Amino acid sequence: MNRTPDILRTPAELAAAGLVPDGARAALERVAARYAVAITPALAALIDPNDPDDPIARQFVPDPAELEAARGESADPIGDEAHSPVEGVVHRYPDRVLLKLVHVCAVYCRFCFRREMVGPGREAMLAPEKLDAALAYVAARREIWEVILTGGDPLVLSPRRLGEVMRRLGAIDHVKVVRVHTRLPVADPAQVTPELVRALACPGKTTYVALHANHPRELAPAARAACARIVDAGIPMLSQTVLLRGVNDNLATLAALMRAFVECRIRPYYLHHGDLAPGTSHLRTTLAEGQALMRALRGRVSGLCQPAYVLDIPGGHGKVPVGPDYLESDGEQVRVTDIHGRVHDYPP
């Protein structure tokens, strides 16, 4: 697997880099003992150490609040285990599966819904016999149209290993689409090499890359260049964003982020409501706040910039749209609310 030097992995290293006060080290050591920490040089360079509310730091620098449990939080908040027929596979929806190739990432988000399952000390890559079993499961089920590579971050794999997985998926006739979920183009853009991009090609299939980014500053020039290498190779990109308190929970930031995606030829796809992962309540918004943001985004920002606001129902019951509703009906008349809040009658 690729490994970038000078990644900040301990509270002592964070303090030495000026990202946390030296006096905070003892409290943060307790957080780091439970949840993985890693901040790449590319992301560390985006953090303003003089801003206590810096939105990049809020995503990656550990916080003592992570040790505070809130009602409803769970180690498996979206129910992966309930839908895992073989190790490495999550089959929640009929026509697609997740294939969790790795359990490590280039950087660790403080709100990660798999935070109890990823990080150093975990199995870095799915063992060969487990990968064989996972691919056999996919090959035996003709209803599976799409395979989503996730983890962890599958792009931390070497081009050789990633290319081998893509070739094996290419040999499964009924799989038509392979989607790769990653943070690497923003976390470590230099690792998005021409060799890695070539490895994303899946013979006879369509490959999509879904980029996770939550703030427009993450799409710095190097990250934009990394995304361009992917798109210029003929691989379309989608976005995934998590709605986070103090990071992107205002119209100006969210609009700037969605516009930045479109400028990079990345289609805004999902805006995720924060999952009930342990120790993440300080980063979650309310659903009402998310709906208000989506209503404000609609009509004020290009239609190209509109993600779907979605919630993963706890317990493994799937993802549903939770955006604002513009229609009301009494059975005889439909009332439609426009972007200015005015209500208009429309025939049923």
Image: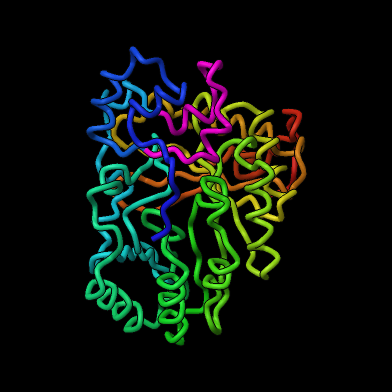
Name the one closer to the observer, 26 or 84: 26
Q: Position of residue 345 (x, y in %)?
A: 75, 38
Count of marks overlaid on the render: 0
Percent x, y of residue 259: 72, 42
In this orientation, does residue 123 appear? yes
Above/below status of 247 relative to 22: below
Q: Is residue 39 magenta?
A: yes
Left or right: 99 as drawn, with respect to 259 = left
Q: Quadrant of residue 116?
A: top left
**Residue 235 is covered by the magenta coloring:** no
The quadrant in which residue 113 appears is top left
Residue at x 39% of width, y 50% of height: 105
The front one of 135 and 38 is: 38
Quarter containing the N terminus:
bottom left
Left or right side of 243 for 329: right
Residue at 50 percent across and 45 percent down: it is 310
Measuring from the top left, give residue 338's x and y in whole percent: 74, 35
Residue in the picture at 65% in, 47% down: 222
For the point 50% across and 16% down, which residue is it? 52
Magenta stretch in the rendered image? 38-61
Residue 318 vertical placement versus 86 (above, below): above
| Residue sitting nearer the eye, 149 or 97 | 149
Residue 163 appears at what percent x and percent y? Answer: 46, 74
Say whether residue 343 is left or right of residue 130. Answer: right
